[in-house]
């Protein structure tokens, strides 16, 4: 018999609502009559938007304009050259937005991981109860399976609500970080290709042309040395490998995703060699901050500061374990 979620009492599964035990039913229209299908509009009435239209609309969108104003404001407030303004803005965005969201993501995932023993226990008891009910009512295997899945989803959802840790909350970081990355990249592309913004009589494009440093003095031109693109690829691959080393015993789907991200990290190298250096500098700084963020979130002290619950897989020496796993996988292969 299963325990009532969130309370100290116990309730038998037989006391659950009958609707939860039966197979799903299709809704029927009121009165028994079918509603007439609505006529489809002609395809020709939908205006076609080409690739150029989408890119132009994105370049002139409000979020991209906001990213441009943010970069201009940081440049005017700090007085730094443009390479310094890009680095400072990236660090500020990563530290103030993505780092708290990443900590929240780890908090949710830790609570979900700690729920797995309870979920397995519920699954075992539910499977037994469904088998008993199937024998009593003569259900087919398909009906019993659908009933088990329906009730299991409901019970697990109640657990997530009880502990306030629905896995969807762990995806908020992606839904914010990815658009921010796109908007900042498009804003820098607008600057590098000749935007209408001007400061002290000089366009931003002219300022970027002399706002670089070291081997990339012109931020509007690609990095002909490929140092920035290759560095970007190496850092992205390091992030992927750190994730892979942390997730021992990955599922087949997780393995495919990891291989896909590895391929994307390698393909980003020639792509980065064809775009202005200002964009690659932002990508490199963002990826480097992401690497530091991943390492910081392994620290037991920082996790304790963020009130991230302890899990079975946590280690007191995460950096030593990471180095040992990296050394074993890539250096001392035997």
Image: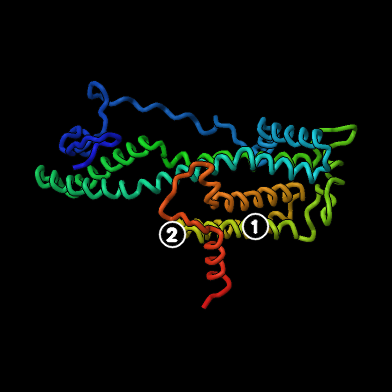
In the shown orientation, is residue 32 left or right of residue 84? left
In-front residue for pair 110/140: 110
Quadrant of the image for the N terminus?
top left
In-front residue for pair 186/200: 200
Q: Position of residue 334 (x, y in %)?
A: 51, 78
Q: Is residue 174 visible?
A: no
Q: Which numbered circle lies on residue 247?
A: none
Q: Position of residue 263 (x, y in %)?
A: 58, 60
Label 2 neighbour load within 10 Å: few <14, some 14-19, many 20+: few
Secondary structure category for the residue under label 1: helix
Label 1 neighbour load within 10 Å: few <14, some 14-19, many 20+: some
The residue lying furthest to the left in this view is 136
Q: Which numbered circle lies on residue 235?
A: 1
Residue at 83% x, 57% y is 215
Q: Is residue 286 visible?
A: yes
The residue lying furthest to the right in this view is 201
Q: Which numbered circle lies on residue 250?
A: 2
């Amino acid at each position: 018999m299963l325990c009532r979620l969130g309370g100290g009492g116990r309730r038998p599964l037989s006391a659950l609502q009958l609707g939860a035990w039966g197979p799903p039913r299709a809704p029927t229209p009121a009165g028994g009559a079918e509603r007439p299908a609505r006529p489809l509009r002609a395809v020709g009435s939908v205006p076609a938007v080409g690739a150029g239209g989408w890119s132009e609309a994105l370049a002139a969108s409000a979020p991209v304009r906001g990213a441009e104003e943010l970069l201009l404001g940081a440049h005017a407030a700090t007085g730094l050259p443009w390479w310094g303004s890009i680095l400072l803005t990236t660090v500020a965005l990563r530290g103030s937005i993505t780092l708290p969201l990443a900590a929240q993501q780890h908090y949710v995932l830790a609570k979900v991981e700690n729920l797995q023993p309870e979920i397995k226990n519920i699954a075992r008891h539910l499977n037994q109860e469904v088998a008993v009910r199937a024998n009593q009512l003569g259900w087919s295997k398909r009906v019993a399976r659908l009933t088990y899945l329906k009730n299991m989803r409901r019970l697990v959802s109640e657990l997530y609500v009880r502990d306030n840790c629905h896995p969807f909350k762990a995806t908020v970081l992606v839904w914010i970080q990815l658009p921010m990355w796109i908007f900042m990249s498009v804003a820098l592309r607008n600057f590098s290709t000749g935007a209408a913004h001007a400061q002290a009589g000089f366009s931003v494009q002219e300022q970027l042309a002399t706002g670089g440093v070291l081997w990339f003095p012109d931020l509007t031109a690609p990095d002909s040395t490929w140092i920035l693109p290759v560095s970007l690829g190496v850092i992205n691959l390091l992030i992927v490998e750190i994730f892979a080393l942390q997730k021992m015993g990955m599922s087949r789907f997780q393995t495919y995703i990891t291989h896909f991200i590895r391929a994307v990290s390698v393909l980003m190298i020639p792509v980065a060699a064809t775009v202005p250096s200002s964009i690659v500098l932002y990508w490199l700084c963002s990826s480097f901050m992401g690497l530091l963020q991943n390492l910081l979130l392994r620290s037991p002290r920082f996790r304790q500061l963020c009130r991230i619950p302890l899990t079975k897989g946590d280690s007191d020496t995460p950096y030593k374990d990471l180095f040992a796993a990296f050394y074993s996988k890539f250096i001392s292969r035997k």
